[in-house]
């Protein structure tokens, strides 16, 4: 992975272990990512792997599985919905895993997402402070 793709707090895979990014250094050709509790451990970003976003991860984090019917074709498909503001039931994030890749719809803007760190970025961009559980 490239350190420029990541943000502080992102969850990624390092040698089969989930780590949380605590620092980044991506200047002058460097590709360093830091993690650790007491003192930062630095690794080159190329040894990190993104964590694929799955239905199980979505459900574990409060997304509700729903069967949705396409009004144009009458086809049913699976969607996952998470709404931080229940007073507006159609708002929130919608995840459609059956379309090309993964797409979230937040107030009519579609964004393709395949990895946990991309979900974290989307939530931050929407102003949603939510910790992701794996």
Image: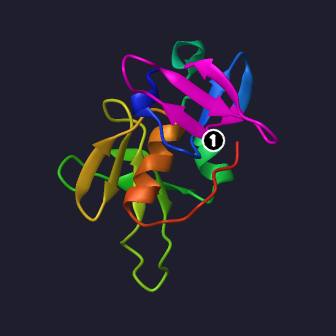
Q: Position of residue 76 (x, y in %)?
A: 37, 47
Q: Position of residue 110 (x, y in %)?
A: 26, 49
The verdict on residue 93 being magenta is no
Range of magenta residues: 19-44
Q: The residue tagged with tag 1: helix, strand or loop?
A: loop
Q: Nearer the viewer, residue 9 or 102?
A: 9
Q: Residue at x 58, y 48 (%)?
A: 58
Q: How is the image coloured?
A: rainbow
Q: Residue furthest left?
A: 72
Compared across the picture, whether 40 is left or right of 72 comes to right
Q: Position of residue 23 (x, y in %)?
A: 58, 38
Compared across the picture, whether 53 is left or right of 99 comes to right
- Residue 119 appearing in the image: yes
Q: Identify the residue position indicated by label 1 in the image.
A: 22
Q: Residue at x 43, y 27 (%)?
A: 26
Give the mark count: 1
> Looking at the image, is 72 positioned above or below residue 47?
below
> Looking at the image, is 37 positioned above or below residue 100?
below
Q: Quadrant of the C terminus?
A: top right
> Looking at the image, is 115 positioned above or below residue 133?
above
């Amino acid at each position: 992975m490239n350190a420029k793709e990541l943000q502080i707090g992102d969850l990624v895979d390092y040698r089969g272990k989930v780590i949380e990014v605590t620092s980044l250094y991506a200047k002058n050709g460097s590709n360093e990512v830091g993690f650790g509790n007491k003192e930062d451990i630095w690794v080159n970003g190329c040894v990190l792997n993104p964590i694929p976003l799955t239905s199980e991860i979505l459900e574990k984090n409060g997304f509700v599985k729903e069967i949705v019917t396409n009004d144009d074709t009458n086809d049913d498909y699976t969607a996952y919905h998470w709404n931080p503001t229940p007073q507006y039931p159609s708002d929130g994030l919608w995840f459609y895993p059956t379309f090309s890749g993964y797409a979230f719809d937040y107030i009519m803007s579609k964004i393709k997402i395949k990895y946990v760190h991309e979900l974290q970025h989307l939530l931050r961009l929407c102003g949603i402070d939510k910790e992701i559980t794996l």
